[in-house]
Amino acid sequence: MPASRRRARSRLRWVGYAILGTVAGALLGPWLVLVLIACGLVEIVASARGRSLGLFLLPAIAVPAGGLGALAWVAIKVGALSYGGGFVIIPLMQSDAVHHYHWVTNGQFLNAVALGQITPGRSC
């Protein structure tokens, strides 16, 4: 954290992000990704200074579209939260793929996880 604080352009924003991240991590669960994305968008807007923001805002428009937008949203959440290792995201993926979007059954999901574990070259 000290290195991050030294690199920060604005100490006030850095403290705000730290407080917001801590509170959101404790209270929001999987919705923490929205807070992380919002903080990233604030930094992009703050550092853009006259550059086009359309390319950065395109994913925010695609998320509520459903279909591929929903798939993209799940991929963004999985990617943003996978820094803890591959096994950290399995409950998140199961929640989205099985319970929320009903893309697969619970048995199919468990089979996919098992196949992923026996595949050579796995990263988990």
Image: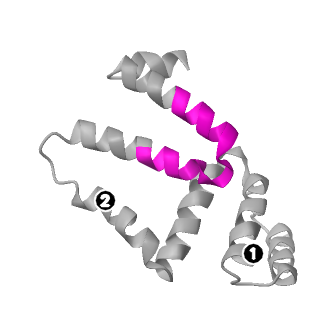
Residue drawn where x is 32% and y is 23% of the image: 9
The local crowd at label 1, few if under 14, some if 14 to 19, many if 20 or more residues have their Cα within 10 Å, is: few
Q: Main secondary structure of the magenta part?
A: helix
Could you say where residue 10 lies in the image, as x and y percent from the top left?
33, 21
Could you say where residue 100 lies in the image, as x and y percent from the top left?
69, 74
Image position of 40 (left or right of 107):
left
Q: Secondary structure at mark 2?
A: helix
- Residue furthest to the front in view is 27
Q: For residue 99, which numbered disc appears in the image? A: 1
Could you say where residue 54 lies in the image, as x and y percent from the top left?
23, 60
Q: Which residue is mark 2?
A: 57
Sequence order check: which comes first, mark 2 or mark 1?
Answer: 2
Q: Is 18 inside the magenta-drawn segment?
A: no
Position of the N terminus, as image quadrant, is top right
Q: What amino acid is at disc 2? A: Leu
Position of the C terminus, as image quadrant, is bottom right
Residue drawn where x is 74% and y is 67% of the image: 95
Q: Which residues are magenta?
A: 19-38
Image position of 68 (left or right of 103):
left
Residue drawn where x is 53% and y is 15% of the image: 2
